[in-house]
Amino acid sequence: MHILIIEDELGIVQFLKQGLQEEGYQVTTANDGSKGFELLQNQKFDLILLDWMIPKINGLDLCKAIRIKDQTTPIIFLTAKDTVQETIEGLKAGANDYIKKPFSFEELVERIKVHFRSKKQTETLTLGTITMDLSKHIVLKGEEEIALTQREFELLAYLIQNKEKVCTRNQILRDVWAINFEYDTGVIDVFMNAIRKKLNLKIEEDYIKTIRGIGYIAQD
């Protein structure tokens, strides 16, 4: 498991890096929010330890930015901020957990293990007779394996992760395509048609519905 530490206090960084490596984790570090964000654009991490008060991009804003593209990677805030309101702010920004400085390393390790267990459970997505294994990049319809392109896989996973919610075409462009400017949303319809064709959905398997003029919704 690969952990990213975004923290500007060198002593804490060295302490955490050494301890987590001894626990068997791969560790990468960044000493400011800008560097952390850059690393996240180019690498995949299994968990993020994020300090609130970091230079360039503070932890709260960085957490929000991460969640625009990544809804699943666990984020644990490490911070001296500990009021109820600040805790709520951190959780609303998308953090999964919050641990106050100074903290017990043993407690942090146990919390990391809990999040990895939870993450492993969410690596399998289901929609009716469709099953997706995110870690192995496998899609099954019943027992039949369905071959999807990378973008088709990401789009189907996004809809299932947001099951029972209407996903607008603009949201899909932003979260799956990472496009934040005006763009032809018709490309999404092309990919959806390809996914439906490959899944060969029958009338009674109407799992992905088109909301005319708006987007799509996945429902069992």
Image (spheres, grey):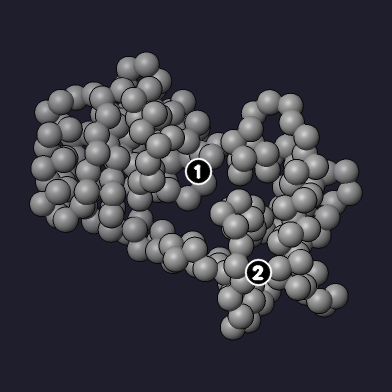
- Locate the N terminus by quadrant: bottom left
Q: Are marks 1 and 2 in contact (CB under 8 Å)?
A: no
Residue 55 visible from this viewpoint? yes
- Locate the C terminus by quadrant: bottom right
Looking at the image, tell me whether mark 1 or mark 2 is earlier in sequence order.
Answer: 1
**Callout 2: helix, strand or loop?**
strand
- Along the horizontal axis of the image, is 162 left or right of 202? left
Residue at coordinates 71% horizontally, 61% vertically from top-left?
195
Q: Please, what is the three-letter code of the amino acid marked with disc 2?
A: Leu
Placement of 132 over or under 33, stated as above or below:
below
- Identity of the residue furthest to the right in this view: 212
Residue 88 visible from this viewpoint? no
Label count reads 2
Residue under circle 2?
127
- Along the horizontal axis of the image, is 200 left or right of 129? right
Using the image as rendered, state which of residue 153 and residue 149 is in the foreground: 149
Q: How crowded is mark 2: few (under 14 residues within 10 Å), some or many (20 or more)?
A: many
- Along the horizontal axis of the image, is 220 left or right of 105? right
Mark 1 and mark 2: span between their CA atoms? 20 Å
Placement of 144 over or under 147, stated as above or below:
below
Residue at coordinates 12% horizontally, 46% vertically from top-left?
19
- Give x and y (percent) for residue 142: 63, 81
Residue under circle 1?
70
- Along the horizontal axis of the image, is 207 left or right of 122? right
- Give x and y (percent) for residue 9: 19, 24
- Give x and y (percent) for residue 110: 24, 56
Q: Please, what is the three-letter code of the amino acid marked with disc 1?
A: Asp
